[in-house]
Image (cartoon, helix red, strand yellow):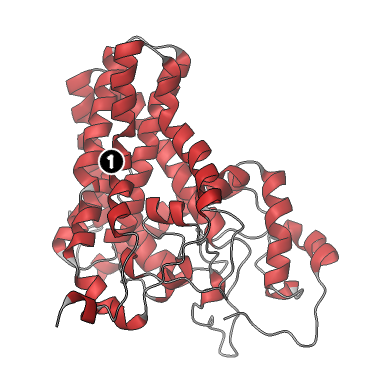
Amino acid sequence: MNNDDKLFGYRDTKRIFWPLATAAALIPVFSIWHYQEYSQTWVLWLNFFVFYGFVPIIEALFGADKSNPPREAIPALRDDKFYRWTAFSTLPLCYITWLTSAWFITATPLTGWGYVGVIISAGMVAAGALNTAHEVGHRRDKVAINVARFLLILCGMGHFRVEHNFGHHVQVATPEDSATAPMGMNFYQFVLTELPGGIVRAWQLERNRLARQGKSEFSLQNEVFLNSLLTLALYAGVTITFGLLALPFAILAAIWANLMLSSANYIEHYGLMRQKREDGRYERVQPHHSWNSNHIVSNVLLLHLQRHSDHHAHAERPYQCLRHFDTSPQLPAGYFTMYLAAWIPPVWFKIMDPLVAKQMDGDMTKAYIKPSYKEKAMARWHRPRNNVVAAE
């Protein structure tokens, strides 16, 4: 049986473009080379301009992603090693850029804007590492888990795989999930609860797991503890190698990467809530508990992160197999555009609150709303109808 037969006639039209998601990690290296040649400070911001300027414009031109693998083609797509090794290639490329940036920022006198540009650009690469770690961290083999590990320690997020896989995926779209944003909570309020909440939840999960095995929470078998030590070793290593200025670089770049992760978490489930059943347990996670975006450019650059409903339904399904459904809640633009909106709360609320109300079909008792915002939300948006049908 040839490959076309295995794919049932499906052809992944994005196949040649997936490497762009990993190659983009080298943009800051080009910027550094260009600066050394021409001393133009603006080029140190090129990574930011590409993702938050060029990408929103070009994806408006390219439009929606029409490629959707049929269920029958998924096994063959899943087993194609091209996709696995494309994702894995993120690891060396991110380290090349991060270490080059650490060397450059300690060896080169820069203006304030230059320093910030290098930190932001390196932080965005670390956020890309985080996104790939999110993808490969759902695999069960040791190679994938270790690739995820060394991607995560780059930005001090060694707890993420535990927190995301065994915390967020279990509690998503409930008030118990620190990574689900209630309607009415702005991005900055969300960051103050989501980031520490994720660390605490991950540590508790590992502590409980090890306790069942009769082991200490400070064992090197504690993934959170081990990865934290590896982050400290990495940051100490670059500081010793390149100088003291490398330490604030590493910390600030990690903070920016963390904020970008929080941006994704903020927009992915905003205002959506699983309902409780009669037995007091939450209903199973369904497609209408995640916001999706089917814009092709950001879909490629984020390894289909935007097909988020299918990801939550099939967490171990690799990126190339994730599918789009028109019936899932849809964001009006790709993630990078929506990040910009999230960073400006009045803009975000103006765009998203009506969409939450529409998704609830006017019954705001089904939305996840910040307590202090609930009265206002109910007064403005609660218009229940007798023929409410849950989205699927």
Above or below, comparing residue 59 to residue 120 in the picture? below
Q: Which residue is mark 1?
A: 154
Above or below, comparing residue 169 to residue 38 in the picture? below
Which residue is situated farthest in the bottom direction here?
278
Which residue is at a point 47% across and 54% down the rendered structure image? 197
- Image-based side of 11 in relation to 367, left or right: left
Q: Secondary structure at mark 1?
A: helix
Q: Nearer the viewer, residue 32 or 176?
A: 32
Above or below, comparing residue 86 to residue 229 in the picture? below
Which residue is situated farthest in the right direction here?
379
**Amino acid type at image mark 1:** Leu
- Image-based side of 290 in relation to 251, left or right: right
Which residue is at a point 33% across and 48% down the rendered structure image? 21
* Percent position of residue 194, x then y: 50, 52
Image-quadrant location for residue 307:
bottom left
* Percent position of residue 42, x then y: 45, 20
- Image-based side of 244 in relation to 173, left or right: left
Task: Check the picture and name the quadrant holding the N terminus.
Answer: bottom left
Task: Check the picture and name the quadrant holding the C terminus.
Answer: bottom right
* Percent position of residue 120, x then y: 42, 31
- Mark 1: few/some/many CA within 10 Å (<14, 14-19, 20+): many
The count of marks equals 1
Q: Nearer the viewer, residue 237 or 313?
A: 313
Which residue is at a point 46% across and 33% down the rendered structure image? 48
Q: Nearer the viewer, residue 348 or 87?
A: 87
- Image-based side of 384 in relation to 130, left or right: right
Which residue is at a point 72% across and 45% down the rendered structure image? 346
Residue 219 visible in the current orientation: no
Q: Nearer the viewer, residue 204 or 370?
A: 370
Residue 9 visible in the current orientation: yes
